[in-house]
């Protein structure tokens, strides 16, 4: 085993160049690297200073919704809950590391109990479109990987965020979920969720009104715990590769 202790990972572009140079000297053919590493190399070479940058599209979305919001939730009456339902919750939007992902963390009441949700949004530079995945404590599998791959369509036009998701019930029935964040201002937004058959009319299922929490409340809620003196340590990444392995 080879071990490398580093505070920064070797960029894929530099790694591929080193492999190519070694192969020329030894007259040995180079086995092409995995496609995802080739994509990383191209992105690294095409960005300023060799460091990939998050897209303007996701930067725009992050700017619009980032922050902690108090949300008023209203579920419309239907056959399962003739009187409807509602309550108060919290919704927190924040950028992931480097601004390449956008995270939506939700805690709110639902007709079947407390709901804890995590939404992950990212921009696909190849397809030029947004993608997303939901994790929900009320799903038996928690995170909907299949939906992220095949069933979710997302759009952001600078004013409204729209999510359409094709859902399949255990008996095979198809339902379309249509969710929109609209009327977005620095202090508020409206979020609606509609359901219906694919291609058919939608019926309102829920309405959420978000109000940004005051800066003092938001900062105190997100402030990390203090580390006792003497316990703060520098950390390094230990990266190990077997002989002949490529990262």
Image (spheres, rainbow, N blue to C red):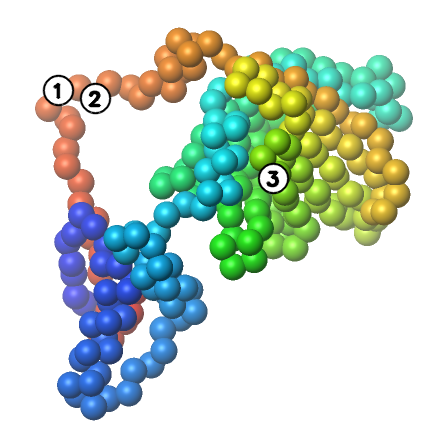
Q: Tell me how far mark 3 sits from mark 1, CA to CA.
A: 45 Å
Measured Cα–Cα span from mark 2 to mark 3: 39 Å
Which residue is found at the position 10% from the left and 24% from the top? Answer: 230
Q: Earlier in the sequence, mark 2 or mark 3?
A: 3
- Which quadrant does the C terminus fall into? bottom left
Dividing the picture into quadrants, the one containing residue 189 is top right
Mark 1 secondary-structure assignment: loop
Viewer-closest of 57 and 149: 57
Question: Which residue corresponds to the image point at 58% horizontal and 35% vertical from the top-left?
Answer: 158
60 sits to left or right of 225: right
Residue linked to disc 1: 229
Left or right of 147 in this view: 118: left
Q: Is residue 65 left or right of residue 155?
A: left
- On the image, the x and y values in percent for residue 62 come to 48, 33
Residue under label 2: 227
Name above or below for residue 130 compared with residue 181.
below
| Image spot of residue 19 (x, y percent) | 23, 75
Residue 171, given in percent of the width and then of the height, sits at 83, 49
Comes first in the chain, label 3 or label 1: 3
**Residue placed most toward the observer, 111 or 42:** 42
The residue that label 3 is drawn on is 156
Q: Are the two marked residues, 1 and 2, in contact with CB atoms closer than 8 angstroms?
A: yes
C-alpha span from label 1 to label 2: 6 Å
Badge 2 marks a residue whose secondary structure is: loop
């Amino acid at each position: 085993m080879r071990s490398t202790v580093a505070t920064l990972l070797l960029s894929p572009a530099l790694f591929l160049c080193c492999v190519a140079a070694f192969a020329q000297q030894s007259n040995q053919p180079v086995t092409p690297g995995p496609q995802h590493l080739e994509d990383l190399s191209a992105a690294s070479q095409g960005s300023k200073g060799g460091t990939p940058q998050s897209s303007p599209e996701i930067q725009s979305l992050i700017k619009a919704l980032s922050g902690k919001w108090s949300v008023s939730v209203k579920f419309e009456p239907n056959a399962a809950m003739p009187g409807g339902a509602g309550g108060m919750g919290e919704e927190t939007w924040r950028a992931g590391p480097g601004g390449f992902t956008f995270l939506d963390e939700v805690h709110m009441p639902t007709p079947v109990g407390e709901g804890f949700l995590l939404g992950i949004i990212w921009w696909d530079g190849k397809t030029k479109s947004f993608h997303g995945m939901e994790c929900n404590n009320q799903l038996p599998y928690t995170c909907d990987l299949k939906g992220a791959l095949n069933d979710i369509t997302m759009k952001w036009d600078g004013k409204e965020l729209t999510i359409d998701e094709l859902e399949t019930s255990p008996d095979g029935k198809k339902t379309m979920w249509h969710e929109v964040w609209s009327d977005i201002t620095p202090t508020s937004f409206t979020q609606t969720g509609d359901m219906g058959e694919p291609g058919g009319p939608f019926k309102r299922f829920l309405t959420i009104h978000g109000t940004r929490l005051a800066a003092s409340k938001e900062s105190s809620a997100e402030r990390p715990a203090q580390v006792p003196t003497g316990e703060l340590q520098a950390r390094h990444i230990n990266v190990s590769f077997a002989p002949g392995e490529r990262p």
